Each structure stands twice: as C-alpha cells, then as structure tokens.
Amino acid sequence: MHRRPALLINTAHIELWPGGLLRARGNADARALARAHWVLRRKRDGRYLAVATAHGVLPLVPRLMREPGIEAALDALETQWHCRGRPEADDAELPPSGLAQRLAQLGLDADAYAADTGLALEAEPAQLSLAGRDRYRRPLWLRRAAARGWQRLQRAAALDGVALDAISGYRSHAYQLGIFERKRARGLAVADILTVNAAPGYSEHHSGDALDIGTPGEPPAEESFEQTAAFAWLQDNAGRFGFALSYPRDNPHGIVYEPWHWRWRPGAG
Ligand SMILES: [Zn+2]
C-alpha cells in the first residue's frame, strides 16, 4: 500500500499530530489515541486537547472551544480531511504570533536582542515532515527538503561505517519559551540561559531546517563531539547534502561553539 509521509500540521497555538505517534499519558488518553487519525496538541505545554477519529472530534479537555487558537486548528483539520494530506507548499510559514509578548515576559526587547546577536527571526513552517526517530525514539520533525537531506546524509554516513543520530530537530517558539521557564524556575538568570539557548523566535530549530546531530555512545550536544569520527565525516561530507555548521568557534552571534548543530541551506552544498 502506498503511504503518504506523515505530516505535522502547525497552527499558532495548536499542532495537529498524525495518529500513532504520540504516547498515551493515561488510560483515557490511550483509548482515545488508539482511534485517533489526528491528535490536537497544545504547543505551550504539550497537553493533548482532542483527537479526530473517523466519527468526529473527541475533546480530551473540558471547554475545548475556549482553548486559544482552537478555531484555526479545527480549520486546519478540516483542510487536511478534505485534501487527504496533500502537502502545502514546502515554504509556507506561520506569521509570528505573540512573539513580542513572549520576549517581554523574559524582559527582552526584540529589536535590541536581534541587533545584539545578529540572529534572525525564524518563522515556524506551516507543516513538517517526519524525518525518522531521534536518539530517544521520539518522532523527528523537519521541513520536507531538510528531512530528505538528513535521511540521505544519515544513509551515506552509514555506508561509510559512520553512525549518526539526531538529538533534536524542529522546536516551536512556544516550546523554546518553555525551556526558559523551566530553567528560570530552577533559579537561572535569563542572561545566563541566553548563552546556551537562543531567545524564543530566534532559534534555528524553529525553521525546521536545523538539527542537532550526535553519534551513539557520545553525550548529546557536547563540544567533545568535535573529536569523533562522526564529526570528521560531517565536516568532509555534510555540504554535499546541503548541510552546514551554524555556530563555528568564535561566531559573531555570541553563541557557544556547537559542532553538533547543522542547518540545511537551500542551494548549499
Ligand atoms: Zn541545535
């Protein structure tokens, strides 16, 4: 049977996940997820809001229709239902929403931050493609072309005897803010978090074109990755598959050296 590649449909506040990919968090969830064609998931905290089954939409929270962004999510669901998963243009992006408020929550001014770091605002894609699983067996989402590029690159490395795995791919603006909130709750200052994490809206992971690459047996996202045969292989070959290192040593963005972070660049390689 011909199967379409799995798609993640993105709206401002809610993601639509294809059925069969999310883990149940309780018995009620498990029964609903087993029948789900789509799962509506709140971006801010990952909460499952509803499932779409062959028989209609089944809410998993009280007052579903009062959820922010629910109308847009249901519209997107309707479109998917009728288009039978026909992919949108690969470059369709969401307009940034609520970004200034998110940054203000962290005491940051968007223009000043962008000027200081030279980082660009990274829009979220309107849809993402499943690019396999990451090291932790979680679904790995990337924009369609980047997903294909990553799978080709990983296969080519394997043929050369080099095992590569993905640590992390697409992340939403809301998810990035959640990282800051969790770290602040542990007592870290925003300025300190910013040396390691880009501000919400400015991480390349939002674009769906960037991913963190590792190799089995090595800790994730450590500078020691630079010493591995996997990194040497990437340096020699990643460009052929359209991937380039984003944050080399002494980069102008004030971001620490990240030998694990690679971005697919249209036209590169
Ligand atoms: Zn990264």
Image (spheres, grey):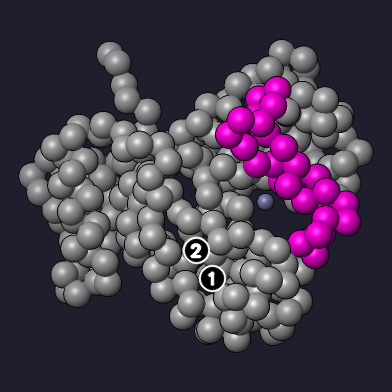
Residues rendered magenta in the picture: 240-269
Task: Decide if residue 6 is in sight here.
Answer: yes
What residue did someone put label 2 on?
A: 173
The residue positioned 80% from the left and 65% from the top of the image is 254
- Residue toward you, 251 or 36: 251
- Circle on res. 214: none
Tell me the SS state at disc 2. Answer: helix
Tags 1 and 2 touching, CB below 8 Å? yes
- Left or right: residue 65 versus residue 261 is left
- Circle on res. 177: 1
Task: Decide if residue 26 is in sight here.
Answer: no
The residue positioned 82% from the left and 31% from the top of the image is 235
Q: Residue 120, located in which quarter of the rendered image?
A: bottom right
- Left or right: residue 226 versus residue 60 is right
Total numbered badges shown on the rendered structure: 2
Q: Residue 35, located in which quarter of the rendered image?
A: top left
Tell me the SS state at disc 1. Answer: helix
The amino acid type found where label 2 is placed reads His
The residue positioned 28% from the left and 14% from the top of the image is 1
Considering only vertical position in the picture, is 146 above or below 256?
A: above
Considering only vertical position in the picture, is 92 above or below 190?
A: above
- Residue toward you, 149 or 253: 253
Considering only vertical position in the picture, is 145 above or below 97?
A: above
The response on whether ligand 1 sits within 8 Å of label 2 is no
- Helix, strand or loop: magenta stretch: loop
Residue 253 is a magenta residue: yes
The amino acid type found where label 1 is placed reads Leu
- Left or right: residue 88 versus residue 163 is left
* Label 1 – label 2 distance at C-alpha: 6 Å
The residue positioned 83% from the left and 55% from the top of the image is 251
- Residue toward you, 263 or 77: 263
Residue 11 is a magenta residue: no
